[in-house]
Structures are given as C-alpha cells and as structure tokens.
Image (cartoon, grey):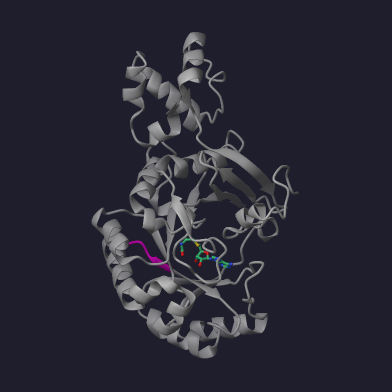
Amino acid sequence: MIDLVEQIVGHQLEATVKELGQPKFRAKQLREWIVQQRVDSFEAMTNLPKALREKLAESCRIWTTTVAKHTTADDGTEKLLVQLHDGGRIECVLLRDGDRRTICISSQVGCAMGCVFCASGLDGVERNLTAGEIAEQMLRLQMLLPAGERLSHIVVMGMGEPLANVDRLLQALNFATDEDGLGISARRITISTVGLPPAIDKLAKLDTRFHLAVSLHAPNDELRTQIVPVNKNIGIDAILQAADHYFDVSGRRLTFEYVLLSDLNDRPEHAQQLARLLKGRPALLNVIPYNPVPGLPYETPSIHAQQRFREILENYGITVKFRHRKGDKINAACGQLRRLSKENLVPLEGTIR
Ligand code: SAH
C-alpha cells in the first residue's frame, strides 16, 4: 500500500503518480483533494476518472491512522484519540478562540523525558511519529472545521518531546508552512520543548522562524532535575544559552513555561530565583497551574499561592501570563485521554458533550 499523506509530506507524490502511469497533474489533483478539499475517500475525488479512482483505492490509502475517539467540550475544544497502524495511540486537539483555530499535536508515542507530573511519559516512549503521522493529525483536525475555515496556529505541545524527533517534525512543519500544504506562517507555529540544546542549535542553524517555548518548571538545577529528570545531563545554563542563541538568530521572542506545583516549585523564593534568571531576557513566562493527573501525588497551588507567585515576578518586571488549560473536562491536556482509554476507564466510542 502507498500512503498518500506520507507521500505528500515527503514530496514523493509526483514520482508515485508517474509510477502508476499517470500524468503529473494528477499529483496536484490528489494533493488538492486531500489537503485543500479535505476529502476522506477516493470516490469523492470527482475530477479523477472512475477507473483511476478504483485503481487508487486498490493500491493506495490516504490515511495510515484512524480516529479511535472524538470528544467535544462545551467551549468548542475537540480532541481526537488517533490510532496508528501498529496500534499505538496519540492525542491531538483543536482549540477555538475568537478567530483563532489552533491545533495541538503530538510528536511521539509516549515520552522519554520523565517529567514527574506529566501523564504522557508515565510509561516511557514507544517510538517517534513519522512526518506523515504528524501531518495526519493536522489534516484530521482540519477536517473538523467547516469548509470556509482554516487552521491558523499550531502548537507542538501534545504527547512526546518534539526536539527528540526533530527531523521528522521539521518535515511535517514544512508541510504546514508550504503554500501547497497548509500555508500557516512559521510565526504561528510553536514548538514546546523540555530544552535539548543540540536540537535547538539545529533550529538556529537551519534558520527556522518557529516560535520556541521552553518548559523550565524550576529556577535551579537541583529542583529542575527532581521535576524534569532529563535535566540531570543538560542543566539550565546550557538550555538558556541555546535558547538565547535561537532568539538572536530567529528574532522570535522566547516563551518559558512553568507548571506550578503546590509546595514543590511555587514558593516565593522560587519566584524570586526565576525572576533573576529571566530578567533581561526578551521572554514571556507562561505559568500553567498543574492540571491533576489521576494517580499522581501532585496538587494545584491555591489561588493565593498562584497570585503570590505572579506578583513577585511582576514586581521584577517579568511578563507573566497564567494559562488555564482549555478542554480540561475532556482530558484535553497532556496524555490523559490515552491513559484513560488504556485503562478502559472510558468507553472508546461516542462523543462526550
Ligand atoms: N515535551 C514538550 C512538549 C509536551 S508537554 C515539553 O516538555 O514542553 C507541553 C507542556 O504541557 C509542557 O510545558 C508540559 O510541562 C506541560 N504539562 C504536562 N503535563 C501537565 C500537567 N499535568 N499539568 C499542566 N501542564 C502540564
């Protein structure tokens, strides 16, 4: 079987169409049907001869993935649990906010970084997603929009560590930015990373314009290694150095993310240390009050502790935003839907409204 999304993302469709004995313009037609017209079957490709549609249906498939579960929240957030050809499962989300149509996509099945509060990494990493599997999430989420609407933003903040799979990720993001692809400007694409300096340097070298969000979660190495174990062999200094360099090259303002965990990283001294660390950097600090994961011992800080944390940082002149996750009710955050389905705590079919 020839996988067409994979072929489109890998720029191989024209060669494949030639091998099938078809003229070149068929490649363009196929791409338009799949990417722009958002069709789900060969029968729907009405400007292709019937015989060709039948031939394609025998030798090719559009998707390698299926949707195992689709949930919708009251605020318009929709989440897909996507099943891969080998049975692995990943999650991706569509968020509606004013005119924005933002999607959050996964880069790996599971995660190897081991952040202690995160549901995605509890069982380690199974494998990297292919560029095609990353792009299929974009296309499947795009299909949830009415014909006149387009995806406007992408955040790579789903399951996995995107920079641990950077080559395939970049291939998929090139598809996202391509005029022939989704035509989304790199400025509207955010890669969220635990902070892997060699991969950040690679982005700088390739002169990419993606927005980088670094998940910091602690203001000193001792605490960060406790919360983000992979930090042990990296260290905050090396991450900040790579991030600063990326800023210098790309001109893209940095974002730092900080999941606020009660009594662990939310004390006044942490806020002060963090402020000193970030002072002078043209950065935005995104604070995310912990979103509880069943079975984990961490707690969301009280509103009072959250405010105290914010005030200290603001007094130092740091730009702070508190981000409250959308779609909590449908477990739209952080590998949670996959866990529930794994443990069979929720039925796999149907829509929760
Ligand atoms: N591996 C990447 C991207 C995936 S996680 C990274 O570390 O950035 C995307 C963001 O969600 C990260 O900042 C992560 O720390 C945060 N996150 C994960 N689990 C969370 C939870 N239970 N509550 C709040 N934020 C969480």
Nearer-the-camera pick, 165 or 236: 165
Give 130 or 171, whichever is nearer the viewer: 130
Question: x and y percent of residue 60 in the render?
Answer: 46, 24
Residue 279 % position (x, y):
38, 81
Looking at the image, which residue is at 67% across and 67% down?
294
Please state, as top left, top right, bottom left or bottom right, where the N terminus lies in the image: top left
Decide which of 210, 172 is in the foreground and name it. 172
Residue that lies at the very extreme toward the bottom in this rendered image: 269
Left or right side of 338 for 155: left
The residue furthest right is 353
In the shown orientation, is residue 202 left or right of residue 128?
left
Where in the figure is residue 160, as x and y percent of width and height? Answer: 47, 57
Tell me which secondary structure the magenta stretch mostly adopts: loop
Q: Residue at x 65, y 84 (%)?
A: 304
Q: Is residue 98 above or below residue 52?
A: below
Can residue 24 be seen at all in this image of the molecule?
no
Numbered range of the magenta stretch: 251-255
Q: Is residue 120 left or right of residue 73?
A: left
Say which quarter of the image contains residue 351: top right
| Residue 192 place in picture, x, y as percent | 44, 61
